[in-house]
Image (cartoon, rainbow, N blue to C red):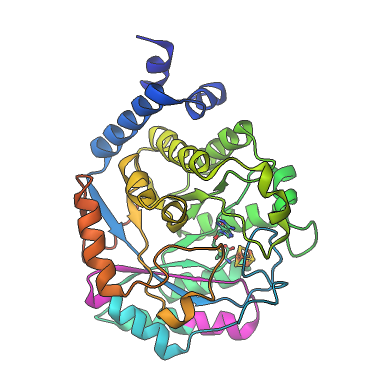
Amino acid sequence: MSSFDEILSKHELSKEEIMTLLAAEGEEMSRLFRKSLETKLKHLDNCVHLRGLIEYSNRCAKYCLYCGVRAKNTKVERYTLTDDEVLECARLAHQLGYGSVAIQSGERDDKDFVNKIEYLVREIKKIDNGSLGITLSLGEQTEETYRRWFDAGAHRYLLRIEASDEELYYKIHPKDKRHDFKRRIECIDNLLSIGYQTGTGVMVGLPFQTLDNLANDLLFFKNKDVAMVGMGPFIPHPDTPLYEHKDRIPSAKERMNLTLKMIAVLRLMMPEINMVAATANQTVDPLGREKAIAVGANVIMPNLTPNEFRENYLIYPDKACVNDKPDQCQTCLDVRMASIGHKVLYNAWGDSKAFLNSH
Ligand code: SAM
Ligand code: SF4
């Protein structure tokens, strides 16, 4: 057995071994992908879980240096969906058999916003007696706010760490009160202790990011014992400060392959977690989501945001599916997943097996 295959057969990976896997190319990369798919099928199955994505608002109080909806981007037309629009999206998710919704938004922590989300979560829970699962991705909040939303019925929360290395974190966020690395970690810890199925993740292929950083990111997810992870390629947005470093990042193909390797290695390290095939994958490669599923991801988030708002939620340019209608999306997903030997699981919450086994 070659030393590469020996690493592939291990359950616990050292940082050096993770880096060896992340550096794999050609035939070795294919062997990694075969092993990660085999691991997923052994511990989970070939089912893909859905979260109907509702992009609630692009109003954001933060200045993340990579994101197109950052507060300082004056070119964006700001919107917030009405209660009816949100509930209509949720009813559509239920009708289409998606089983769960994910509410994502720019970050706000004012009283109106916190109350509104609590109200919307309670209203969504009333649809067919609580049959929809609810994931929130609404940034950093106080522990009390997280608890209120949890008590209202949200049971999963996604808060990417974005970069688990403090130095890199401050290269992609301004260093000020609003963007505090320690607070972000504290938020993840609070979500875990409240009892959310907690998800985190990073962007892959950021300027200044090294293989060493990425290996540490994977170890960070493992050490925090999170239930879900979302990773996607970084896509430079021309109206953001990080765009000036666009020539320092790997090519789109390299970012895609690196993202796939991150997903594959993490599947070996955490066989039972939920992993999202992020839309950003499909933006850099038309088959990006299928590729992510085929190497270990098991969740897809079809967009339910009303079409007229989607083009204002451009966190990065050329976002995939901006013009698709939800029913087109459904057929398209079934066909796309079948093409790689997977099937979409309808009418289920699709909770993280890792979480269910540890609680
Ligand atoms: N505001 C919330 C937050 O930051 O957690 C949720 C919404 S935010 C738009 C969701 C994710 O989009 C972020 O966690 C970030 O990783 C990703 N994102 C933002 N800008 C991006 C870019 N230029 N390329 C790829 N992903 C990006
Ligand atoms: Fe706002 Fe989230 Fe974008 Fe940061 S990543 S600017 S918090 S929407």
Say whether residue 79 is left or right of residue 325.
right
The boundaries of the magenta stretch are 94-118
Inspect this view and state whether residue 215 appears: yes
Quadrant of picture, ligand 2:
bottom right
Q: Residue at x 65, y 58 (%)?
A: 66
* Image x and y of residue 89, in percent: 35, 80
Closer to us: 70 or 123: 70
Task: Let me know if residue 113 is in the magenta part.
Answer: yes
* Image x and y of residue 290, in percent: 32, 49
Task: Let me know if residue 166 is in the magenta part.
Answer: no
Q: Residue at x 26, y 80 (%)?
A: 129
Quarter of the view holding residue 33: top left
- In the image, farthest residue toward the top: 1
Quarter of the view holding residue 329: bottom left
* Image x and y of residue 328, in percent: 26, 71
Inspect this view and state whether residue 359 appears: no
Q: Residue at x 52, y 42 (%)?
A: 255
The correct choice, above or below, for 273 with respect to 122 in the image is above
Closer to us: 232 or 86: 232
The correct choice, above or below, for 114 with respect to 275 in the image is below
Closer to us: 331 or 266: 331
Say whether residue 279 is left or right of residue 175.
left
* Image x and y of residue 182, in percent: 71, 52
Closer to us: 210 or 61: 210
Quarter of the view holding residue 156: bottom left
- In the image, farthest residue toward the right: 176
Number of marks in the image? 0
The correct choice, above or below, for 126 with respect to 6 in the image is below
Quadrant position of the N terminus in the picture: top left
Q: Residue at x 69, y 57 (%)?
A: 183
